[in-house]
Image (tube, grey):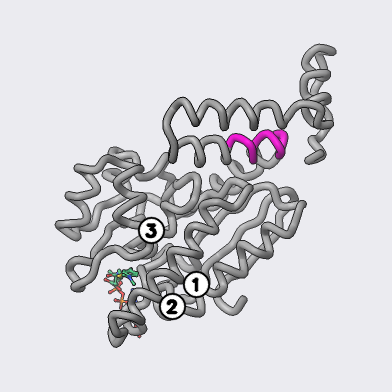
Amino acid sequence: MTNILLEKKGLYAVATINRPKALNALNSEVLQDLNELVDIVNADEEIRALVLTGSGEKSFVAGADIGEMSTLTKAEGEAFGKKGNDVFRKLETMPIPTIAAINGFALGGGCELSMSCDIRICADTAVFGQPEVGLGITPGFGGTQRLARLVSPGMAKQLIYTARNIKADEALRIGLVNAIYPAEELLAAAEKMADTIAKNAPIAVRACKKAINEGLDVTMDEAIVIEEKLFGSCFETADQVEGMGAFLEKRKHAPYQNK
Ligand code: DAK
């Protein structure tokens, strides 16, 4: 990967989008790297949680690359949108939890990228927005869909139609992010959360992610069946036996083995 730095830190990893000359904007190459990142992390059984952030102090991701998009034909625009959507969906559905540590601008494709992660926390300097209609296009990497589901349809429509940027405190108020940290403390907070998640029973954590994601797409009757099956799948795992055994024996459980 030329534009993403990946660092393994014990049971979790930190991926940093690193294209500082364009405020980490997403061109085809970065999208390709994101695709490769998901493949690498999915293939590594030691990684139990992933933090995604942007390099530098100014920007998480300042959107899709406007230079690259500016000359696209209709067919090329659709293909570019599909490329981004495929990668973002792959990120959204990867088995382990993902945390977006939003360290600055999260505009357009940057806001959309953060919404493809499970959890969003941000720096007090972060700025969010879907500025696309100001550029003559629609949000094309899932923004119309994920923002409406995450905040509310009315609030998503307001943000998208007005193309207005919002600051961290407003993002918190509308539920776009879970928490705000002083910029210099953001990454440590994201890593602490990743480490906490990674120390819980990984099979159960992955089952929770699958249950929540898949359950949200179906009726409640279907969703509880998904939950029942995933609940059942945790039994007879070494980690379930150890976790419950430790409780009953009034001792701390041994490190979970992902088995
Ligand atoms: N693309 C390419 N380059 C960008 C960029 C971007 N999105 N954002 C910033 N840069 C570049 C700037 O051009 C500049 O490059 P140089 O001039 O130094 O070569 C460098 O990064 C530093 O930026 P600034 O000099 O502008 O820095 P400032 O601090 O003054 O301003 C800013 C920061 C983030 C407010 C400003 O750069 C800005 O407004 N950037 C654009 C933000 C934006 O509008 N983002 C949304 C892009 S639209 C679709 C698929 C996808 C999408 C839509 C449809 N389908 C196919 C249907 C997604 C669309 C988007 O994401």
What's the residue at 48%, 44% (across, down)?
119
Image mark for residue 27 = 2
Quarter of the image where one finds residue 144: bottom left
Q: Residue furthest left?
A: 162
State yes or no: discs 3 and 2 in contact (Cβ < 8 Å).
no
Choose between 7 and 239: the one closer to the eye: 239
Could you give the CA–CA distance between mark 3 and mark 2, rounded to whole angstroms? Answer: 14 Å
Residue that carries the numbered disc 1 in the rendered image: 31
Residue that carries the numbered disc 3 in the rendered image: 112
Give the image quadrant in which the ligand numbered 1 is located: bottom left
Q: Secondary structure at mark 2?
A: loop
Find out if the beta carbon at label 1 lies less than 8 Å from the nearest ligand 1 atom.
Answer: no
Q: Which secondary structure is most common in the magenta stretch?
A: helix
Find out if the beta carbon at label 3 lies less than 8 Å from the nearest ligand 1 atom.
Answer: yes
Could you give the CA–CA distance between mark 3 and mark 1, rounded to whole angstroms? Answer: 13 Å
Image mark for residue 213 = none
Above or below, 194 against 39 in this view is above
Q: Amino acid at mark 2?
A: Asn
What's the residue at 63%, 48% (across, down)?
95
Q: Tell me the magenta residue range.
A: 200-208
Quarter of the image where one finds residue 257: top right
Confirm whether the magenta stretch covers residue 145: no
Residue 219 image point, x, y percent? 42, 31
Q: Amino acid at mark 3?
A: Glu
